[in-house]
Amino acid sequence: MPLKAFRGPKVWLWRWRRNPLKRRADVLEAWVVLGTLLLTVLAGVPAGLAAARSVEHGLARQRATWHPAVARVAARVPGPSRPSGSHASAGERIWAEVRWTAADGSAHTGQVRVEPDIRAGTPVTVWTDPRGHLVSRPTTASEAAFRATLIGLLVGVSTAAVPLAGGLAARARLERRRLDAWDTEWARLGPQWGRTV
C-alpha cells in the first residue's frame, strides 16, 4: 500500500488552521518556516541587487576613465622559446617592455604581452588609467552586465543561505524535541495498550 494512503491528501497551511490536535510546537514551527522564508527573501534579494549595481557602476567607471594609448616596444622581441621539435601555438604572446607618454606628458614604461618576433619601436595599444598607469582592457557593456548579474546572483544566494541555514537548524531542533516528546509519551502510554480490561 502506498505511503500516501497513510498520510492522506496534502493540505497547505495546515499549521495555521484551527485544530484541537494542533500542538504549540506545530504553531512555533509554522512561525519558524514563515520567518525563515521572509528573512531569506528579504536578505538575499536586496544584497544581490546591491552587489550587481555596485559591480556594474564600478565597471562603467572604468570604461569611462580608462583609455587606450599607443606604446612603443623598447627592444626587439625574440621569437618564442620552445623545445626542439615543437611548434609555437597560434596567438602565443611574450612579455616585453614598452614605453608610452601619458595625457599629462609624463613618460612611462611597463610590461605587456606582445606578438613574438617584433622590432623595437613597433607600436602596440595599451590601456591606461587617468594617472597613466597600465591597466587591463575595460569590460564592454555586455560583459559588465553579465559579470554584474553573476556576482549579484552569487552574493544574493550566499546572503540568503545564512537565514535559510538558521531556519533549517531551528526546524530540525523543533523536530528533535517533538520526537523526544513522543518517545516520552509512548514510554508512558505504550505499555497500557497490551493490557486487557
Image (tube, rainbow, N blue to C red):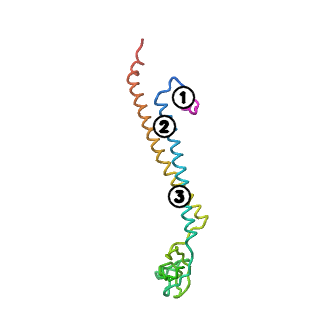
In three-dimensional space, the C-alpha distance between marks 2 and 1, rounded to whole angstroms, equals: 26 Å
Please name the residue shown 46% across and 81% down the image.
Answer: 83
**Residue at mark 1:** 6
Dividing the picture into quadrants, the one containing residue 6 is top right
* Above or below 14: residue 140: below
Tell me the amino acid under the disc marked 3: Ile
**Of marks 1 and 3, the one in the foreground:** 3
Tell me the amino acid under the disc marked 2: Val
Q: Is residue 184 left or right of residue 58?
A: left
Q: Is residue 179 left or right of residue 5?
A: left
**Residue at mark 3:** 151
**Residue at mark 2:** 32
Queried whether the magenta region covers residue 23, the answer comes back as: no
Residue stretch in magenta: 3-14
In three-dimensional space, the C-alpha distance between marks 1 and 3, rounded to whole angstroms, equals: 46 Å
How crowded is the residue under tag 2: few (<14 C-alpha within 10 Å), some, or many (20+)? some
Depth check: 43 or 77 in front? 43
Please name the residue shown 58% across and 69% down the image.
Answer: 64
Mark before the other along the chain sequence, 1 or 3:
1
Mark before the other along the chain sequence, 2 or 3:
2
